[in-house]
Image: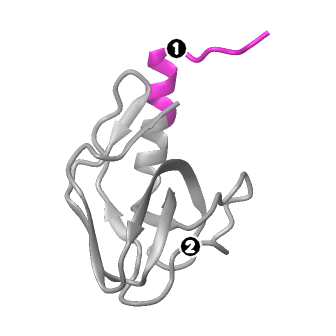
Amino acid sequence: MASIVTNYQGNLFLQALINAGSLYLGLFLADPGVTGSFVDEVSGGSYERQLFTPSSPSSKSFGNSNLIVFDNLPACTVTYIGLATMKFGGSLTLWSAITPQIVPNSARLTLAIGDVVWTL
């Protein structure tokens, strides 16, 4: 039998994640998996994780309430995004596959407010 979390409880889970500290969005070339591996995180150019400012959870979802800009990226194809607990190092808390983003060398990748949404 499948378990189902109510919106109320799901929102509490997400709020606890948000309240635990700052979150940073990272870009990945492959699935980081359930272990939260950073092995396939983008590297090179001026890449670094960007601050992720979450919206308030609603209906077991939350998204970015800030513009997120990655500047001067190396040539790559981004296939996953993930939320990390620190700008450098830390742990991966959530990740998701995305429509592949082909990034030319030295390009910018911009995510508008609400472009990233996490749902339980």
- Mark 1 secondary-structure assignment: loop
The residue that appears at 43% across and 81% down in the rendered structure is 75
In the figure, residue 11 lies in which quadrant? top left
According to the image, label 2 marks what residue?
A: 41
Residue closest to the eye, 38 or 108? 108
- The span shown in magenta is 1-13
The residue that appears at 20% across and 53% down in the rendered structure is 112
User: Where residue 77 sits in the image (x, y, percent)?
Assistant: 48, 68
Whether residue 78 sits left or right of residue 72 in the image: it is right
Mark 2: give few (<14), some (14-19) or many (20+) Cα within 10 Å: many
According to the image, label 1 marks what residue?
A: 6
Q: Amino acid at mark 1?
A: Thr
Residue 3 among magenta residues:
yes
The residue that appears at 53% across and 30% down in the rendered structure is 120
**Eyeballing the image, is 19 above or below 111?**
above
User: Where residue 9 sits in the image (x, y, percent)?
Assistant: 51, 21
Q: Amino acid at mark 2?
A: Glu
Label 1 close to label 2 by CB (< 8 Å): no
Whether residue 72 sits left or right of residue 101 in the image: it is left
Q: Spatial distance from mark 1 to mark 2, Cα to Cα?
A: 33 Å
- Mark 2 secondary-structure assignment: loop
Residue closest to the eye, 79 or 8? 79
In the figure, residue 24 lies in which quadrant? bottom left
User: Where residue 89 sits in the image (x, y, percent)?
Assistant: 57, 77
Is residue 55 at least partly visible in the picture? yes
